[in-house]
Image: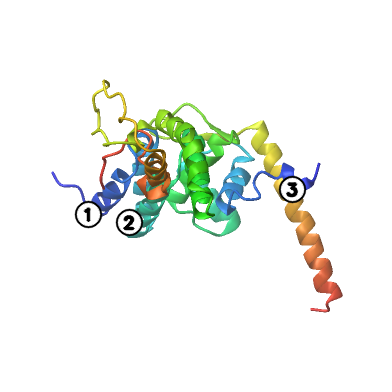
Amino acid sequence: MPADSQDVLRRAGDASVLILTSLADGPKHGYALIQDIKGFAGLQLGPGTLYGALDRLERLGLVEALPADERRHPYQITAAGAAALRAHLDSLERVGAVGRLRLRLGGI
Amino acid sequence: MTRPRPARVVGFSLRCYPRRWQRRHGAEAAELAELLIRDGVPARSIACSYLRAAARERLTPRPRHWPAAAAAALLIAAASLGVPLGLLSASAPASAASAARAHPAGLGPRPRCGGSASQTGPPARPALDQARLASLWARPAALPAADGHGEHC
């Protein structure tokens, strides 16, 4: 099976990848996700973008909402989400390796 | 007592979401906005983010609308490619009927929110007319929200 067909995050958008990466080390609610992503990626995810991506990921079965803690819903990555993130990161690594090799070959 | 202006701006943008979304995320989204404002994020940028996402939420067809939308899109594509009208007339009733079953509000006069359950659908019309009507609701802007049509920002 081609690697691309396993990479369901290929068209999911950067926000989805950032959210899955953030959830990879444990469940988080919206504010914690935004803070964590700001810490490791250096960008502030808009709250609308965050909830749009969370809804999409939930529909795809890649994350799931845990019981609400007061008004906040923590989210956690599912097994399918972890597999999708792994496949996407593998794909990025392959592209990165080719890019670096070609830059070296091109003498740039 | 009136709320401070940033909260009102954000509250307005949150009310632009469909009711289903508001029930699911509304309280949490309002709390998140409060925390972000406290961190120094401008209320206007938070409101803009919610407004953009609300528009996307309303314009994105829900999965259960896809079969009917696909049927309508196929009809439009066939019509624009110049498929003979007779062929369209032969195939349209089935597609239009399935579209009507999947989404009766798209054909005939649109019922108001909480419209009567006794509505049995529009009378039979020529096939092309039905196909055109089906194509109208297939446009993203004309898609009503899953459970909140008739809401306004």
Q: Residue furthest top?
A: B118
Q: Which mark is residue B5?
A: 1
What residue is drawn where x is 53% and y is 59%?
Answer: A43
> x, y percentage for residue B51?
35, 52
Q: Which residue is mark 2?
A: B43
Q: CA distance from mark 2 to mark 3?
A: 40 Å
- In the visual, does A24 lie left or right of B1? right
Count the labels in the image: 3
10 Å crowding of disc 1: few (<14), some (14-19), many (20+): few
Regarding mark 2 in the picture, which secondary structure is present there? helix
Regarding mark 3 in the picture, which secondary structure is present there? helix
Whether residue A27 is visible here, answered yes or no, is no
Q: Amino acid at mark 2?
A: Ala
Q: Chain of mark 1?
A: B
> x, y percentage for residue B56?
42, 49
Q: CA distance from mark 1 to mark 3?
A: 48 Å
Regarding mark 1 in the picture, which secondary structure is present there? helix
- In terms of image quadrants, where is residue A81? top right
Q: Chain of mark 3?
A: A
Q: Which residue is mark 3?
A: A4
Q: Are marks 2 and 3 on the same chain?
A: no
> x, y percentage for residue B89?
46, 40
In this view, the mark in front (2 or 3):
3
- Which of disc 1 and disc 2 is earlier in sequence? 1
Of residues B104 and A57, the one drawn nearer to the viewer in this rendering: B104
> x, y percentage for residue B86?
49, 43
Q: Chain of mark 2?
A: B
10 Å crowding of disc 3: few (<14), some (14-19), many (20+): few
10 Å crowding of disc 2: few (<14), some (14-19), many (20+): many
Check if mark 2's residue and mark 1's residue have beta carbons within 8 Å. yes
